[in-house]
Every structure is written in structure tokens, then in C-alpha cells.
Image (cartoon, rainbow, N blue to C red):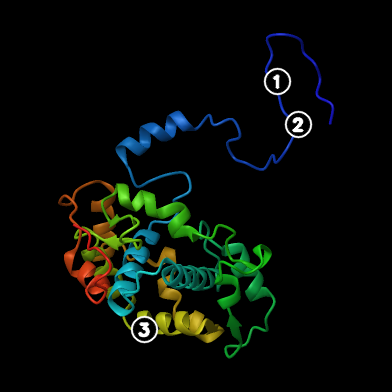
Amino acid sequence: MKMKDFGPGFPEWTELGQDGGLDPLGMQRPIEAIYQSLLPGISTITLRFRYYSFFVWMLEVYARDQGNTDPVSFRAFQRRCETLFALIAARGSTELGVAGIDWAQKQLNDVPNDPETIIDFSIGADPDTDVDQRYLRNKGGAFGGIYATRMFEMGLITLGDDRNPIAVCTNRALPLAEAFAVEIGELGTAFLRCVKGGTVTLADLDRMAPMQPSEILAGSAEHRLLVQILLGQVEPRRVCRRLICLSYAAMPDVSRAA
């Protein structure tokens, strides 16, 4: 494409490329800098309130039940959790702002609407599968690519490093993880069973509908804690030693976080 020459003093534009961005010139950045200084956990791509409670619950479950510090193992678990969460959100009335929702809608549209229909989401969750088959192109998923840094700024998690590569919850996050677990009750067991197997039936998705992002109950402990955390109304963060011990106690070659 030949660019028009406007003469000296005008910007030298490159050829036209992708034009689907929402803010191609970065004009929103000054606004973001202001509101992120007031609400560190919020950005233009952290779109759903419940991801914060869902992810701290996911991290605690992983530390408690698996305790494997191999990043490959954690990413496989994390991406399956996100993929199943997207399928739950896409079943029934579709939720917006959920990572992988387009992929999930396609999976549901391509199968018979029978309660016993089984959806195998293990391939879509696999970070090494063909990019066109992934629920999300970014191998880090929604947690690694979007929410982890925000949750760190909010004091909910520690970010992994070379010695302890898996993010863990701080003491600030534990009440929220527990509140989410209480809200979903026995659905948490069903969710983790499906994550482990990499498959889910439509009946399971219907049963797990209360886990959808819009199903936060106003006035519940989960709702109250989310508001307090986002507004900075909780105690300073500390790393939760209980979770670190669960994750690393059996691995003497791994240094524990302070």
C-alpha cells in the first residue's frame, strides 16, 4: 500500500496493519494511570469482578491438593480451570468479559443440546495445541496474561520467581478464597472432578451455573470482601505461610518464600 506524502512536519505512518484495537493511539493511557492509582486492581481488561475470588480459590486448591512447583503442571491445571469456567459462563444466557467465551460458545453450538452430551475441553486448554484450537491464544491464560499482575498489586498473591515459580495467596486472599468456596459449596468438588478429567457434560454445566460471574450474591461474604479488597479496606498483605508450606514442604530443593 503506497502511503500519501504530506510533506515535512507530518508523521511517517507505516503501512496499515491490524485495525481492530480499541485504543490504537494509546489515548486512554493517561486515564488508566489515574484510575489505577486509585484502584490498583482494575484495568480495561479486568472485566469481571468474580475472577478475583475464582483465582484465589484456584490457587489455594492447587497448593492444597497438588503442591507441585513445576510451572508446566500448574499451567495445565490453571488453563483447564479457565476453560471450564468459560464453558459454564457460555451455557444458558452468555456472560460477557470472560476469557475464552467465543471458543466456549462454539463448542456448545457444535454439540447436541442433550444433558448427557460430553464436551472434551482438554485439547482447547492445552497450551501446546494448535493456536486455532486453544480457548485463548495466550499460553499464560487469563490469570497469567491479565489478572496475576493486578492481583499482585492488590496484595492478593505473590508472583512466582526462579526459586518459587508458582504464585501463592497472601493472608489477604484467604478469606476471599474461603468465601468463594462457601458460595459454590459442593459444586467445587464437581468442578475439580471435571478439571481433572478434562471433560464435562451439559448436565454438569447446568449444575455449575451458580459459579457464573454474574451469580455473586449481593451482601454475601464474597461480595463484601471483593468490595473491601478493591477499595483497599483490608489489612496489609503478608504471604500465607500455611499455603507455602503446603506447596513446598515436601520439596527440600525448593527455597521457601519469606
Mark 2, residue position: 15
11 lies left or right of 237? right
Q: Circle 2 — which element?
A: loop
Number of the label disc, if any, that sits on residue 244: none
Q: What residue is at 68 percent from the left and 9 percent from the top?
A: 9
Mark 1, residue position: 12
Distance, label 3 to label 1, CA atoms, is: 57 Å
Q: Residue furthest left?
A: 235
Q: Which quadrant holds the N terminus?
A: top right
Whether the residues at callouts 3 and 1 have beta carbons within 8 Å, the answer is no
Question: In the rendered structure, which disc, 3 or 1, sits on the residue that comes first in sequence?
Answer: 1
Residue type beneath disc 1: Glu
Which of 29/12 is in front? 12
Q: Quadrant of residue 54?
A: bottom left
| Closer to the eye: label 3 or 1 | 1
Residue type beneath disc 3: Thr
Residue 63, percent from left and from top: 30, 72
Residue 184, percent from left and from top: 34, 76
Q: Residues within 10 Å of mark 1 (few under 14, many from 20)?
A: few
Residue type beneath disc 2: Glu
Residue 48, percent from left and from top: 43, 56
Q: Circle 3 — which element?
A: helix
Whether the residues at callouts 3 and 2 have beta carbons within 8 Å, the answer is no
Height in image: 159 above or below 197?
above
Q: Circle 1 — which element?
A: loop
Number of the label disc, if any, that sits on residue 189: 3
5 lies left or right of 80? right
Q: What residue is at 27 percent from the left and 53 percent from the top?
A: 227
